[in-house]
């Protein structure tokens, strides 16, 4: 298996997994994204994506955002607690970000949870 692959076990795929996070989440907003999180009873973090057509009309743009979210999560997951994360987009402004700027904004989100982890 490719080591750079994000396996299914670290992704939220079922609707009840999303509902669980949305029931009592912690929220962080950066630029035009919101990251919801809630602790899980697993020994690893998981990620879910909710990027709607309402704000991002073109599929290639949604896919670009998802690809960068998954990649930054994959590279930072070893520093995160056992949390379930869901990233949502709440503004069209995200389309104005270059790939590098988008990656930097995503790193800010993961950095916050790395700091949060160390304070606990």
Image: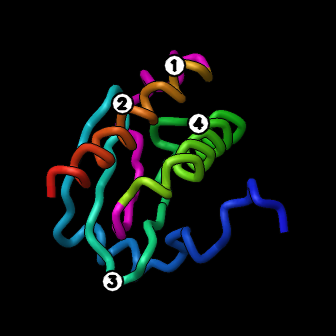
State which quadrant residue 32 falls in: top left
Could you say whether the residue bearing mark 1 is in a helix, strand or loop?
A: helix
* Residue 57: numbered disc: 4
First of labels 4, 3 by sequence position: 3
Could you say whether the residue bearing mark 3 is in a helix, strand or loop?
A: loop
Is 96 covered by the magenta stretch? yes
Give the quadrant of the N terminus. bottom right
Q: Nearer the viewer, mark 2 or mark 1?
A: 1
* Residue 32: numbered disc: 2
What's drawn in magenta, residue-wise? 81-98
Judging by the rendered image, the residue that carries numbered circle 1 is 101
Could you say whether the residue bearing mark 4 is in a helix, strand or loop?
A: loop
Q: Nearer the viewer, mark 1 or mark 4?
A: 1
Characterize the local packing of mark 4: few (<14), some (14-19) or many (20 or more) Cα atoms within 10 angstroms: few
* Residue 46: numbered disc: none
First of labels 4, 2 by sequence position: 2
Q: Residue at x 40, y 81 (%)?
A: 42
First of labels 1, 3 by sequence position: 3
Q: Residue at x 64, y 33 (%)?
A: 61
Is the Cβ of the residue at disc 4 closer than 8 Å to that at disc 3? no
Could you say whether the residue bearing mark 2 is in a helix, strand or loop?
A: loop
Give the quadrant of the C terminus. bottom left
First of labels 3, 2 by sequence position: 2
Q: Nearer the viewer, residue 77 or 97?
A: 77
First of labels 1, 4 by sequence position: 4
* Residue 41: numbered disc: 3
């Amino acid at each position: 298996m490719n080591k750079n692959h994000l396996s299914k076990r670290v992704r939220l795929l079922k609707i009840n997994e999303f509902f669980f996070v949305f029931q009592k989440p912690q929220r962080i907003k950066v630029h035009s994204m919101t990251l919801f999180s809630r602790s899980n009873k697993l020994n690893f973090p998981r990620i879910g994506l909710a990027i709607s057509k309402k704000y991002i009309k073109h599929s290639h743009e949604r896919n670009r955002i998802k690809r960068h979210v998954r990649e930054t999560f994959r590279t930072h997951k070893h520093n995160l607690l056992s949390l379930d994360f869901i990233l949502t987009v709440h503004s069209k402004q995200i389309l104005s970000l270059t790939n590098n700027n988008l990656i930097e904004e995503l790193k800010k989100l993961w950095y916050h949870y790395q700091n949060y982890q160390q304070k606990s």
